[in-house]
Image (cartoon, rainbow, N blue to C red):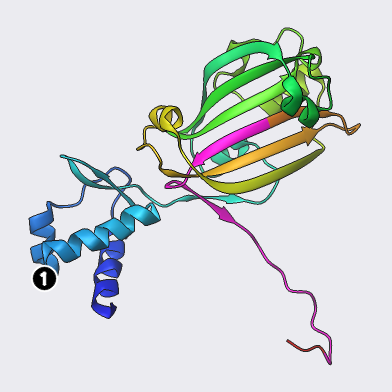
């Protein structure tokens, strides 16, 4: 195991100098360079695939994915987050429908199940790379005249503030692991059943009235969650 981990770490060191999308040398050449068998190399690469560090494309080779984007547990929009990283955010509207809320969405938005809501499915991109699928529900009465074109390559929260005078005041969000289904994987350009992070968020404005319910799936090979933990002041007599 010690030797195996050494090989894995050598591959990780190699990845440090590789850009996203850059290809590993052919399997035989890489195994010879590391002085290991091709079976051991495959096992090490399998672990890197599971960690989301590389992607194996059958018939093409192994490619670096670049470092994962860390998502802080803080209130920020996707657009703001990508701009802060020096990346170009983008949005592509996959579908835009006006429909009845139904019981589940109605409870989330505090509206009757027969109330009219707008259901929007957006593909979120960073530097043209698909990162997440976002399913957004918002009561139609809050956003009169909203159309699909309004949400192409723009910040939804900025649009709400400037056009509808709705300002985010409070959000409740849950995060859990999931696997991408066939349709999600196809749109995100990854294999079916790939690991992902599922975000569900209900957001309210200044008066505590919910204005959105969002369900987003983020690629597990490109995203991770970051938290900052601060220990309370240790007073004399405290025990660990």
**Helix, strand or loop under label 1:** loop
Q: Is residue 155 visible?
A: no
Quarter residue 202 falls in: top right
How crowded is the residue under tag 1: few (<14 C-alpha within 10 Å), some, or many (20+)?
Answer: few
Q: Foreground: 214 or 104?
A: 104
Q: Which residue is drawn at the image coordinates 77% and 40% (left, top)? A: 171
User: Which residue extends farthest front?
Assistant: 103
User: Which residue extends farthest bottom?
Assistant: 237
Left/right of residue 146 with respect to residue 50 in the rendered view: right
Left/right of residue 174 with respect to residue 177 in the rendered view: right
Quadrant in the picture for the C terminus: bottom right
Residue 165: percent from left, percent from top: 82, 21
Q: Foreground: 167 or 30?
A: 30
Q: Is residue 153 visible?
A: yes
Q: Which residue is drawn at the image coordinates 12% and 51% (left, top)? A: 26
Q: Which residues are magenta?
A: 214-237
Count the marks: 1
Residue 11: percent from left, percent from top: 26, 63
Q: Is residue 89 above or below residue 70?
A: above
- The question of residue 226 being in magenta is answered with yes
Residue 46: percent from left, percent from top: 28, 56
Q: Which residue is mark 1?
A: 35
User: Which residue extends farthest top?
Assistant: 145
- The question of residue 65 being in magenta is answered with no
Quadrant in the picture for the N terminus: bottom left
Q: Which residue is drawn at the image coordinates 57% and 53% (left, top)? A: 225
Q: Foreground: 143 or 160?
A: 143
Q: Which residue is drawn at the image coordinates 65% and 36% (left, top)? A: 77
Q: Is residue 30 above or below residue 201?
A: below
Q: Is residue 182 above or below residue 61?
A: above
Quarter residue 60 falls in: top left
């Amino acid at each position: 195991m010690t030797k195996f981990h050494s090989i894995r770490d050598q591959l990780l060191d190699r990845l440090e100098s590789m850009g996203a999308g850059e290809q590993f040398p052919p399997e035989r050449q890489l195994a010879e360079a590391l002085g290991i068998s091709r079976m051991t190399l495959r096992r090490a690469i399998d672990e890197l695939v599971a960690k989301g560090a590389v992607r194996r494309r059958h018939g093409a080779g192994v490619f670096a994915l670049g470092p994962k984007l860390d998502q802080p547990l803080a209130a920020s929009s996707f657009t703001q987050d990508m701009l802060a990283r020096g990346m170009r955010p983008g949005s592509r509207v996959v579908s835009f429908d006006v429909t009845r809320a139904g019981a589940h969405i109605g409870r989330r938005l505090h509206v009757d199940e027969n109330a009219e809501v707008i259901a929007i499915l957006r593909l979120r991109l960073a530097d043209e790379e698909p990162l997440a699928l976002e399913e957004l529900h918002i009561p139609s009465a809050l956003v009169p005249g909203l159309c699909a074109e309004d949400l192409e390559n723009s910040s939804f929260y900025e649009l709400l503030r400037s056009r509808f005078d709705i300002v985010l005041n409070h959000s409740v969000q849950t995060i859990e692991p999931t696997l991408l289904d066939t349709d999600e994987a196809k749109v995100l350009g990854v294999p079916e059943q790939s690991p992902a992070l599922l975000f569900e968020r209900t957001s309210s404005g200044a008066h505590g009235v919910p204005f959105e319910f969002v369900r987003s799936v983020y690629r597990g090979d490109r995203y991770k969650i970051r938290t900052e933990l601060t220990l309370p002041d240790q007073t004399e007599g405290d025990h660990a």
